[in-house]
Amino acid sequence: MEFAQLAQLNAYNSLARQRHAGSSRFDDFTFSIFAENELKQVVPKVYDRRYRELDALEFVPAATGINPGAMAWAYDSFDMRGQPQWMGAGATDMPRADVAKARFSFPVRSYSLGYGWTIEELMAARFTGQALDVKKANATRRGMAEMEHNTILSGYPSLNIPGFLTNPATPRVIVPTGNWASGASADQVLGDMNAVVDSVWVNSARVHQPDTLAMPIDKFRIIQNLRIPNTGISVRTYFLENNAFIKEIRPMFELQSAGPGGTATMIAYQKDPMNCEAVIPLPFTQLDPQVRGLEVFVPTWQRHGGAVFYYPMSAAFGDGI
C-alpha cells in the first residue's frame, strides 16, 4: 500500500473512533496513562493502612536475617554438660565436659491474595473522572494481615508451622484459685498472677525473668476494675508496682480459648528475641499489576515460618482463670 493511501486509511479510522466515542475520546494511550496513574496511587494506600487490633507482632518480636527464598528455617539448641569430681594426686581418669546439640527445623510457606479491576471498571472511572475504588485493595490487605496475625499466634499444625500459643513445650500451671468471674477476691487474683510469674523464674532455675503478662480481654477488665481493699488502687496497678519482674500487662483476645479444652488462660513470658521470635522472611508484598484478559490484577503475597520459643522455659501458661 502506498504512503498516501495508508495516510488516508489512518485518517478514516481516526475519524470513525472519534464518532464512536462521541465528544470524548478513549484511545489506548490516554487510557493506559490513566490506569497507570491510578494504580500508582492505589498501591501506596494499601501499604499505608494499619490494623491496630491485629497486634501479634506487639507480643512476639520479628526475626531478622532469614532469606525470603528460604524453604525452611532451623535453630540449634545446646545443652552444656559437665560434672567435676574430686581427684587425688596423679589421677588420670578426669571427667569430661561436653555439649549436646539438637536441631529443630520448620518449613517456610507462602500465602497470597489478590485484587483487581475489569477493563470496564477502569473505563468507567476514566469516563466519570473518579479515582478507582480501593475497597478491593483494602480487603486484600486486611485478609493478609489477619493471616499473618493468626499464623504468629496459632501457627498451622497441618503444615508443621509453629505458633506462639501452641508450643507443646511451654509449661502450664494451674492457678491456685481461678474462676475470677465467680467472685475471686483481689488477693486471690493477685495470688494467681504471682503463681504463674514465679513459676517461670523458679522452673528455669532463675535464668529467665518474665517481663510480660498477657491474658484474655475479660480477665484484663477484671484486674482493671477490681480494687485492693480499703484503697482506690486496681489489681493491675498494684501488681505492676509491686511485682519484681512484670513491666507490662496486655489483653489478648486469642487467650480466651488457648487453654486446655478451649478454656481461658494467661501467659507470662520474657519478651526477648533471644527467647521467642516470629519468622517472616518476606513481609506483605504487592507485585506489579498484570493484565489478564479483560482485567488488571494485582497479586500480593507473604512468606511465613510461624513463631517459636527458643527457650520454652522462658514462659508459662496459667490455666483455670
Image (cartoon, rainbow, N blue to C red):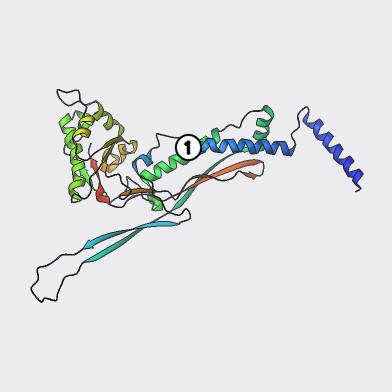
Left of 205 or right of it: where is 134? right
User: Picture coordinates of residue 109 (x, y %)?
Assistant: 45, 52
Can residue 174 be seen here? The reply is no
Read off the residue under disc 1.
142
User: Picture coordinates of residue 3 (x, y %)?
Assistant: 90, 46
Q: Please, is residue 234 above or below residue 289 in the view?
A: above
Q: Residue at x 11, y 67 (%)?
A: 85
Pick whichever, 17 or 38, lies toward us: 38
Crowding at mark 1 (Cα within 10 Å: few <14, some 14-19, many 20+): some
Total labels: the figure holds 1
Pick whichever, 160 or 302, lies toward us: 302
Q: Quadrant of residue 25?
A: top right
Secondary structure type for disc 1: helix
Q: Label 1 sits on what residue type?
A: Arg
User: Picture coordinates of residue 19 (x, y %)?
Assistant: 81, 30
Pick whichever, 160 or 290, lies toward us: 290
Q: Residue at x 21, y 32 (%)?
A: 180
Left of 257 or right of it: where is 30? right
Q: Quadrant of residue 228?
A: top left
Pick whichever, 201 or 121, lies toward us: 201
Quick one: quadrant of the C terminus? Answer: top left
Q: Quadrant of residue 225?
A: top left
Can residue 272 be seen here? The reply is yes
User: Picture coordinates of residue 36 (x, y %)?
Assistant: 64, 39
